[in-house]
């Protein structure tokens, strides 16, 4: 979940390395550092906190040099201070690392017994220590690198420079992604192609177990056994411009507002607007003949999958087994080849999701990937890729990726329904018609509810705990509402299936615990209103998110009622996402938190 980058160039690299780190800051932002070699000496600048602090330091003390590596950190081992910030130096070796060296404690003990002095609390330092030891023992740089890789276990993307070789970067990958960029007389290395996009679009991806030697004129790539391997150079579509906030205060706000447009774009990939039909899906998955579907993902992407479960079961009569990827990967779930598996991930790099994918692949299942980053590892390992086409999502809290995931899952469920004969042509037309209408309705909703939600958020920001309730597809939405609120405002929030209220959480209800009820006037409405009544009877304050019919039908007094237009059931999860996202956003803004980069989080979670 850290970001790494390297350049072996013909002009100074420090500024360009920091520019690349800015594109990787979504991977972690608790400290950063850059190291170069100049006049045959390694030197570095490191700073705790956001990248801005490193930039300030570099402005005061510039770092010359035509070769360098850099890092933005999301701490796993050791507090986020300057000492633990990468690059780590040991006797002329500099290392940056993304991932976790799982056997670092044993190696540390071994090296400690041999007299090595460790100065950081990181797992990464053992890599630098091992390399330095092998050099002292007389091994060449490549031999040392190969020997080190045979000793470390775990997940890593590594970049290494040696003080006595100012024209080579060494790199290795086991788990987290690593892209090699080919420039004109310069070579680049980065955690993803977006980081390298200002420099080159000619990218080769290292595969698990690969390690590479980059010189100014190219790269030699080896497998773990030390054999030369070729990795194809692809033309990356990552855009070079630095994505900006436009007129918005935060990326999150911009991304909320972008949703109608990006969803429309995503939908056009999956449905034929003129014919009001779904387009044929990627042939990698044969929905017609499946006995079941397994879905796995993490966080918000998992909650999109949970909504998808309702759709696949309802519209395609396809049984769905779903779990968070960190559980799925270890459950030893019995799987059979007449099932397929779907993995949902914005980044396409989430370690647990990838491990679940590999588990299903090993069991012979066909794999579908619902991803935003088409060049990602999850996309590359899937049999069928279903892009969500949301464009780069910078805010750490997912918004537009969530609703685009939903739009894609809804289209796939309708497709599956047609393929399995559970939906008629007329059903398809009606459902697709509703999907096509969604961006327009969403756009109206954003503008209509924004002022009310902004003022309501001021009140909400005074509470310490909030409960979200919903039934049917509004249940995963209640979970998503709670997740969004807690991750960016730090207010404690829980989501519950409305029917579960009386099985425990009702004990918490009092005037200090607002209850946000998500209840369109659908087939569950009456039941949810009964649960609301239970809350009201105990003095609970209700924030009611419903439609015109629902508002008219409920006679309960609320703290606020947010009224949305009546919409078809298939699009309500996307439409109701808008008030819950805006509520979390404005509450966080009132509380003065770092909305786009909330504490302790990172956008791409490449460790377990
Ligand atoms: C929450 C959020 C996270 C991600 C989760 C999975 O707002 O963004 O919960 O959804 O970390 O990430 P991806 O989708 O990249 O696999």
Image (tube, helix red, strand yellow):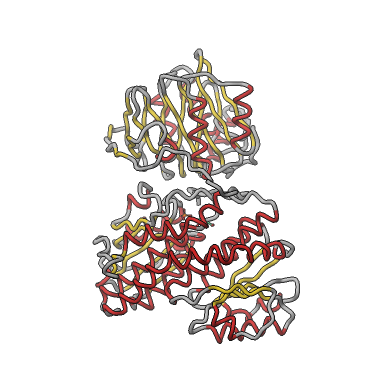
Left or right, 172 with reference to 399: left
x, y percentage for residue 390?
Answer: 42, 54
x, y percentage for residue 280?
Answer: 25, 65
Left or right, 492 with reference to 214: right
370 above or below 216? below
Q: Residue at x 48, y 84 (%)?
A: 523
Return the residue nearer the eye: 451 or 185.
451
Left or right, 190 with reference to 274: right
Q: Residue at x 38, y 76 (%)?
A: 313
x, y percentage for residue 85?
Answer: 60, 34
Q: Residue furthest top?
A: 39
Q: Quadrant of residue 371?
A: bottom left
Left or right, 419 with reference to 66: left
41 above or below 330? above
x, y percentage for residue 129?
Answer: 53, 29
Return the residue nearer the eye: 364 or 571.
571
265 above or below 167? below
Q: Residue at x 64, y 49 (%)?
A: 594
Return the residue nearer the eye: 432 or 601.
432
Return the residue nearer the eye: 65 or 338.
65
């Amino acid at each position: 979940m850290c970001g790494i980058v390297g350049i072996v160039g013909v002009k100074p690299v420090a500024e360009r390395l920091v520019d690349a780190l800015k594109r990787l800051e979504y991977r972690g932002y608790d400290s950063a550092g850059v190291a170069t070699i100049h006049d045959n000496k390694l030197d570095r600048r490191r700073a705790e906190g956001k990248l801005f602090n490193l930039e300030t330091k570099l402005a005061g003390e510039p770092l010359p040099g035509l070769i360098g590596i850099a890092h933005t950190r999301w701490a796993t081992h050791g507090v986020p201070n300057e000492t633990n910030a990468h690059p780590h130096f040991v006797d002329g070796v500099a290392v940056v690392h993304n991932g976790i060296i799982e056997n670092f404690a044993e190696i540390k003990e071994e090296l400690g017994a041999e007299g090595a002095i460790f100065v950081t609390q990181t797992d990464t330092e053992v890599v630098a220590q091992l390399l330095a030891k092998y050099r002292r023992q007389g091994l060449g740089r490549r031999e040392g690198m190969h020997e080190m890789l045979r000793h470390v276990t775990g997940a890593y993307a590594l970049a290494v420079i040696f003080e006595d070789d100012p024209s080579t970067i060494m790199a290795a990958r086991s788990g987290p992604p690593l892209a090699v960029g080919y420039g004109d007389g310069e070579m680049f290395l980065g955690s993803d192609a977006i980081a390298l996009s200002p420099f080159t679009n000619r990218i080769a991806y290292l595969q698990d177990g690969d390690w590479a030697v980059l010189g100014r004129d190219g790269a030699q790539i080896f497998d773990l056994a030390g054999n030369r391997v070729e990795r194809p150079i692809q033309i990356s579509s990552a855009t070079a411009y630095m994505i900006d906030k436009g007129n918005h205060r935060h990326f999150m706000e911009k991304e909320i507002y972008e949703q109608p447009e990006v969803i429309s774009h995503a939908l056009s990939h999956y449905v034929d607007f003129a014919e009001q039909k779904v387009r044929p899906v990627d042939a990698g998955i044969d929905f017609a003949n499946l006995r079941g579907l397994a879905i796995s993902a993490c966080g918000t992407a998992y909650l999109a999958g949970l909504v998808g479960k309702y759709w696949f079961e309802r519209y395609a009569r396809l049984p769905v087994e779903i779990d968070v990827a960190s559980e799925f990967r270890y459950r030893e779930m019995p799987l059979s080849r007449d099932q397929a598996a779907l993995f949902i991930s914005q980044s396409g790099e989430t370690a647990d999701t990838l491990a679940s994918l590999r588990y299903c692949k090993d069991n012979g299942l066909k794999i579908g990937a619902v991803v935003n980053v088409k060049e990602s590892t999850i996309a590359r390992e899937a049999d069928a890729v279903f892009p969500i086409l949301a464009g780069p999502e910078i805010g750490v809290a997912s918004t537009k990726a969530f609703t685009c995931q939903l739009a894609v899952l809804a289209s796939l469920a309708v497709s599956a329904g047609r393929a399995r004969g559970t939906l008629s042509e007329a059903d398809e037309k009606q459902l697709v018609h509703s999907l096509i209408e969604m961006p327009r309705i969403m756009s109206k909703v954003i503008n209509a509810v924004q002022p009310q939600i902004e003022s309501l958020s001021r009140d909400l920001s005074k509470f310490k705990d909030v409960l979200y309730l919903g039934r049917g597809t509004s249940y995963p939405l209640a979970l998503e509402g709670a997740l969004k609120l807690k991750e960016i405002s730090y207010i404690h929030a829980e989501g519950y299936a409305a029917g579960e209220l009386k099985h425990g959480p009702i004990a918490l209800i009092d005037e200090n615990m607002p209850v946000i009820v998500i209840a369109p006037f659908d087939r569950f409405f009456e039941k949810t209103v009964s649960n609301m009544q239970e809350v009201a009877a105990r003095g609970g304050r209700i924030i009611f998110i419903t439609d015109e019919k629902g508002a008219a039908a409920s006679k309960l007094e609320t703290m606020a009622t947010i009224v949305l237009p009546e919409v078809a059931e298939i699009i309500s999860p996307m439409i109701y996402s808008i008030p819950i996202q805006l509520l979390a956003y404005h509450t966080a803004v009132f509380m003065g938190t770092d909305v786009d980069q909330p504490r302790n989080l990172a956008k791409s979670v490449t460790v377990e």
